Amino acid sequence: MKNIQKTIRKTVVALGILLLFVACENHLEDLYDNPNAVTTIDDAALFTNAVRSLFIGTSDNASSHFAGQHAHYYVAGSTWRAPDQYGDGFDGDYNSIFNGLYGGTIRHIEEVLELTTAEGTSNKVRNAMAHIIAVLGYAKITDAFGDVPYTEGGKGKSQNIVQPKYDTQESIYKDLILRLTNSITILKTADPTMGYPNSDPIFNNDLSKWIRFANSVRLRLAMRLRYVDPGLSEATVNQCLSQPLMETTAHDAFMIETEGTGNAWFTRRTGFPSVKVSNTLIDQLQGTEDPRLAVFVSTNGNGDYSGMVNGLTDQAFGSSDFANRSDMGLPLASPDSKLYVITAAEVWLLRAEAALAYDNDPVSANTLYRKGIETSMNQWEVAAPEITTFLASPAATLAGNNDEEQIGVQMWLALTPNFFEGWSHIRRTGYPMIPIRTTDNLSKGATNGIMPHRFNYSSFELGSNTTNATEAINRQGANKIDTPVWWDKN
């Protein structure tokens, strides 16, 4: 009996100690709780980060190391010159580009899309704006690689999808256009207070500009389909022309990077690796007495415009006097230079091309073409008399025999400094013509002298997502830089 009583007393004491411990622990947890701690994610901050990442991406590795050289805007020095030689073996770069695109804009905007459709935080206006940014993020990565994870892309965190399937570029493009169409419909009748009044770094929550923005991006994507799906392309173009589009520089989608050293092209002009302007660009501007020459290009030490030849072999490069060639112009490569995603000038030129392709209307095409040139020059604050003089020159009027090429070359100029889009434009249209490299002083690289058409899936991706990446390669073509993506028919 005594033993039973003793056991009961021990149990009561133990329970008392346990309850006291739990109470103390709960009290400690209360003390450790930070009353100012963030307990919910602010979709406005995520949205701003996604937008900022999108604009900074116009000067990222994909653009500065690869696209700008492939598109013959410039030549980089040192080891960064290898892509200009159409070389391959950039597995680490391809992997960082792939992961950077998914880990930046796409990751942030996927979180915004999830929050703006979740119970308690649902917001159709914010969701529509987020879809527009998502479209631009996914468009860039599919234009870079071809087939990529899309329906399951960017959802590793929210849905724990670590081996996402790859979607065809055709299905991605069709869905991107649909997303933009739906966003435009929502924003037409939207209450601006439901948007991002204090977190929109592009248009300061002006929804009328967002509608023009979305519709202009839709026009770009529609024209990207011109040679691969002309029916969908024309139908979408007509739909775009019935809605407001970007028309003036006040509608341009740009951002000024204010952190660190600012615009990354500033470091390319003043630091490592240095970048020198291509003679392809300089020759085009000089040959037509284009006043944007002084905007896009700086003079060398002798006060001249002196460009670099793209694709030189190592031996030829050694005697090229690279250091004394022209740098990028200050308007492009200053710390506070604007980063552009899409501009009114591009839109006018897309409309000019569409007028030729789908309306067979050279008169309207010429009017739109001239408007595109004028708008581009206004974008760079070219003096009015210089604009007037250029518009009176033969280069500013469609000649009737090479209209497609004229429009294509002016588009290539107007896309400056969005060099990745310039590369995509050449792949789609073939303009300006980048000749196949045949001479001994030019490197033929891994493509036998043909401009590269895509980035490769990295060995890391092939190893970590083998089944899905292999399926994409079997469907799309060899995992090589001269394998064209779906819409690339020129």
Image: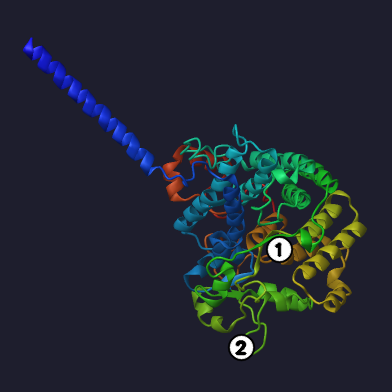
Query: Closer to the camera, 314 or 246?
Result: 246
Which residue does the image show at 57% across and 50% down from the upper left? 45
Q: What is the x, y in percent for residue 212? A: 78, 51
Q: Work out which residue is located at the far top of the displayed protein and give it.
A: 1
Instruction: First in sequence, mark 1 or 2: give its number.
Output: 2
Above or below for 380 versus 306: above
Q: Amino acid at mark 1?
A: Leu
Query: Closer to the camera, 475 or 94?
Result: 94
| In the displayed structure image, the side of residue 217 where residue 34 appears, left or right | left
Q: What is the x, y in percent for residue 88? A: 49, 60
Above or below for 319 versus 268: below
Label 2 Cα crowd, 10 Å radius (few <14 / some 14-19 / many 20+)? few
Q: Are marks 1 and 2 in contact (CB under 8 Å)?
A: no
Circle 2 sits on which residue?
A: 301
Helix, strand or loop under label 1: loop
Q: Where residue 415 is drawn, which disc sits there?
A: 1
